[in-house]
Image (cartoon, rainbow, N blue to C red):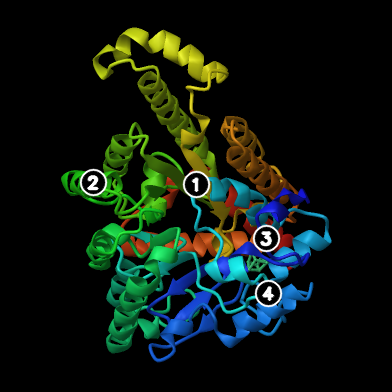
Amino acid sequence: MNDEYKKFWPIKSDTSCYLKWSWSTIYLNRGTTASCHRTVHNHFTAENFDDFHNLPKKLDDRRRMLAGGWPEESETTKWGINGCTYCKHIEDQGGVSDRIVQLQNLGGVLQNHDNAIPPELLSNPDAVEITPTIVEVYFNNVCNMACLYCGPHFSTMWEEENRRFNAQEDGILVNPSWERDRERYYAMRDKLFVWLREHGHKIWNFGMLGGEPFFQEEFDMVLDHWENYPNPNLMLTIVTNLKIEHRRFVKYIDRLKLMVETGKIKTLNISASLDCWGPQAEYLRWGLKLSEWEKNFAYMAPQEWIILNVNLTITPLSIKTLPELIEKINAWDHDRLMRITAKNLKIPPEKFQDFQDKLLQLVEEKTDPRVDVNKHICISFMHVLDPTQMNPLWFGPGVFTEDMQRVVELMPGFTEFQRSFKTYMQGIAISIENTTRDPKKILMLETYMNEMDRRRGTKWSDLFPWLVDQFAQARTELGELGE
Ligand code: SF4
């Protein structure tokens, strides 16, 4: 591990984690919080809300890390993750964990955000009671889409569909009972805004996730908050499905632009979710209107003041049309960089067309410092673990080999961030090839898609004809196994 980070990170122990000290993910409606997306959640209530970042388990985790150890493995998630074992296992095998990546990126974060280190650590590197500097909030499950790999815990559209079809609490399609306690939710929400009024100026990254932020009443509350209690060091992060009527979307982007220009916040970071291109994308992300997504995304792409990311979820249904999406992103990215370069070269917008060839050449060469590679559109992703039938690994070697090769080829690698995600995508491709095919899980996908077709009036075989053979083959394999 490159130990450049030691110049900036006050804690000297070998297992300390930037996220464990700085980050809180809050699920407001469930009353849980975690130090990152890889570890277990701790419960809290409206009564002890102010301690959400300093609950006994988190304090214990930090003390153990200060002493060079790892958090106690006291609870296990359904994916077998407990304590910080996700990172520990990777590091035990000589790999690069999230913990290491975050520490190595810290220098870059500090270049743009002087408040990235929690204030208590600046005066006492052994401090364990900490004010978080990164807070992301899942307010509730209000959402206008019902993606195939999601569920009622993140989507009211899923909840409504389950009610309509009388879904039983049978494992896959349960409704989240914790969503029903509105009183508790409103108490938690009030507490959050009170906490933000007092501590919001210490945060450098505030994220709003969903459900769908643009579809939730809390979105205006969040914007009102930062307008009334500005934090000129803040990056406001919004993770969105971009399902919002274009004119409304433009109004919000204008409002956010004004917030940046008037120093209410420092930057806007938008992460737009999409998994592949074409009707397959609309099947997977049920409720999506791809033309609307495209229009909203294309509106943002040339605006260099927005940090822009596309967030992909890798499933067996997305891989074959994922290359088309990456080609689209690359085209938007090219145009974006050309426009930014034109601005840096002081070429007036009306003369942009006249300089196209020259700009294209500069962007492809990337040697001129006025081609600002830090403004690239980023691509991030994860592959589905749950529901298990949407995990592409179960198809084993051969089914996605060429598609994944194409995806990896197309993924850009100009910046450190892009290169790390390209390597990660290569890792997923290798994992699929090295996984033993599981015909039972493959047939679970067939059952699931049949049920979705029954509910939604769709027909999967029209969009995924290759699956017809795959399901037939899985039935044969299962018969050969005598099951
Ligand atoms: S799982 Fe890894 S990144 Fe998350 S808090 Fe633990 S050590 Fe840090």
Q: Nearer the viewer, residue 482 or 156?
A: 156
Sooner in the amino-acid sequence: mark 2 or mark 3: 3
Mark 2 to mark 3 CA distance (whole Å): 35 Å
Residue at image point 24% right, 59% down: 227
Q: Position of residue 324 (x, y in %)?
A: 47, 33
**Is 363 situated above or below 269?**
above
Instruction: Name the spot of residue 18 as percent of width and height, x first.
Output: 62, 63
- Judging depth in this view, the residue of 409 and 301 nearest the camera is 301
Residue 162 x/y as whole percent: 34, 74
Q: Amino acid at mark 2?
A: Leu
**Structural crowding at the residue carrying mark 4, measured as other residues with C-alpha within 10 Å and reported as few (<14), some (14–19) or many (≥20):** some
Q: Which mark is residue 126?
A: 4
Residue to which mark 2 is pinned: 258
Q: Residues within 10 Å of mark 2 (few under 14, many from 20)?
A: some
Tag 4: residue type? Asp
Instruction: Please indicate whether residue 374 sits to the left or right of residue 248 in the image.
Output: right
Q: Quarter for ligand 1?
A: bottom right
Q: Which mark is residue 99?
A: 3
Q: Is residue 111 above or below residue 23?
A: above
Q: CA distance from mark 1 to mark 4?
A: 25 Å
Of label 3 and label 4, which has the lower sequence position? 3
Q: Is mark 3 within 8 Å of ligand 1?
A: yes
Q: Nearer the viewer, residue 96 or 380?
A: 96
Residue labelled with disc 1: 112
